[in-house]
Image (cartoon, grey):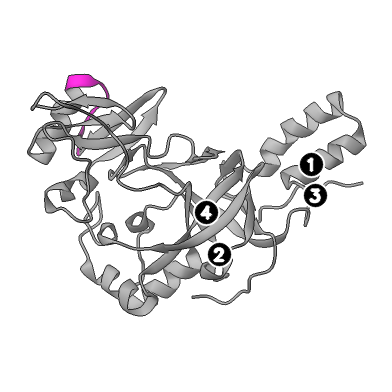
Amino acid sequence: MRIAMALHGSPKAGAPTVATRFGHFESHCRNELSWSAFVVAALGMGCCENARGLMAGHVIEVWRYPVSSLGGEKLTSGEICLSGIAGDRTHLLVDLDNGQVASPESDLRWRKALLMAARIEGTSVVVSVGKHEASHGSELDRLVSEHMGFRCGIRAAGTMVSLTNGSTVCLKPRYDVTPLHLITTSSLRALSLELGKSFVDTRRFRPNLVISTESNDQGWVGQSFHVGVGGGGLVKEVAKRCGMTMIAQQGIDEDAEVLRTIVRKRHRAFGVYATVSSVGVVGVGDRFSLSVETGNGSN
């Protein structure tokens, strides 16, 4: 039996693909398992052609946002955990006087949060503001406080914070975070036409994965998906957009027309949310497939 390795079209040069990482898995299985057991394992990981459903597209961007409400980091690859991309939205920007968690989409004083960006280096979360950055304690608090104009800091979700009135509060996200947020090139092209623009920056929508496809992602809801090595889950619901879509970010101007157009023409829906049931690794160039065919019309 021949195991199909060329599943990924033409990924970017140097990008890790399932085919590359699969080689290590194959070598291990040849040593530890019988050939028949290897084939069964490969089928379970989605590494055989047509083994795990019909082709929907390929991953062209992977994003992680270590601090909720801040800009994120573009990855070559990332681990898929039950909670989403490993390291995603693990920290919060918080007012250290009253314990309020940042809400840029609804509170003007938090709008500048999106002009900061966060990334993970080792075990540390590094926050950058223009040419300045910090990752630890009082230095980090000072950087974000000076940028925001009031006393605030970056804290891990679940941390107990002492407030100026002597009370303590446990920091929690303002809403339940769905593990993965997906958008597609099909939707981006359609929105560009609706806006009369040649390009809409993916960063406006803060996705975890951008999928290159002609498929209508709104039709994916309720379908199981498989991506990368071992990753999979369920496309749960369409993503309803909020004010974050129009707010200025690093290198992106504020543009209220983006949100207006999505509200008028798309009933606030752009992209989809998904849950994870099977952990793995996803990288740029990896195949994204669905359990059943959902159509090829663009939206």
Residue occupying image coordinates x 68% and y 39%: 20
Q: CA distance from mark 3 to mark 2?
A: 28 Å
Q: What mark, if any, has residue 11 been given in the picture?
A: none
Q: Is residue 176 above or below residue 98?
A: below
The residue indicated by pointer 4 is: 274
> In the rendered image, is residue 288 in sight?
no
Type of the residue with mark 4: Ala
Give percent across and percent down for residue 161: 22, 26
Q: Name the residue: 49% across, 64% down.
A: 185
Residue 265 in which image quadrant: bottom left
Sequence-first tag of 1 and 2: 1
| Relative depth, front residue between 15 and 34 | 34
The residue under label 1 is: 42
Q: Position of residue 104 (x, y in %)?
A: 21, 51
Up the image or down, 29 lies above or below 77; here it is above
Task: Give the mark nearest the N terminus, 1 or 4.
Answer: 1
Q: Earlier in the sequence, mark 4 or mark 2?
A: 2
Instruction: Judge whether residue 204 is colored magenta.
Output: no
Q: Report helix, strand or loop for mark 2.
A: loop
Crowd tier of the residue under label 1, counting other residues whose Cα lies within 10 Å: few below 14, some 14–19, many 20 or above: many
Bin the neighbour count of mark 3 within 10 Å (Cα to Cα): few under 14, some 14-19, many 20 and up: few
Looking at the picture, which amino acid does disc 1 mark?
Answer: Ala
User: Pointer 2: what residue?
Assistant: 221
Q: Looking at numbered disc 2 in the image, what kind of residue is underneath it?
A: Val
Residues drawn in magenta: 130-138
191 up-or-down from 177: above or below: below
Of 180 and 248, nearer the camera is 180
Amino acid found under the numbered disc labelled 3: Ala
As for residue 135 lying within the magenta part, the answer is yes
Label 1 to label 2: alpha-carbon separation: 27 Å
Question: Mark 3 = which residue?
Answer: 4
- Label 1 and label 4: CA atoms lie apart by 24 Å
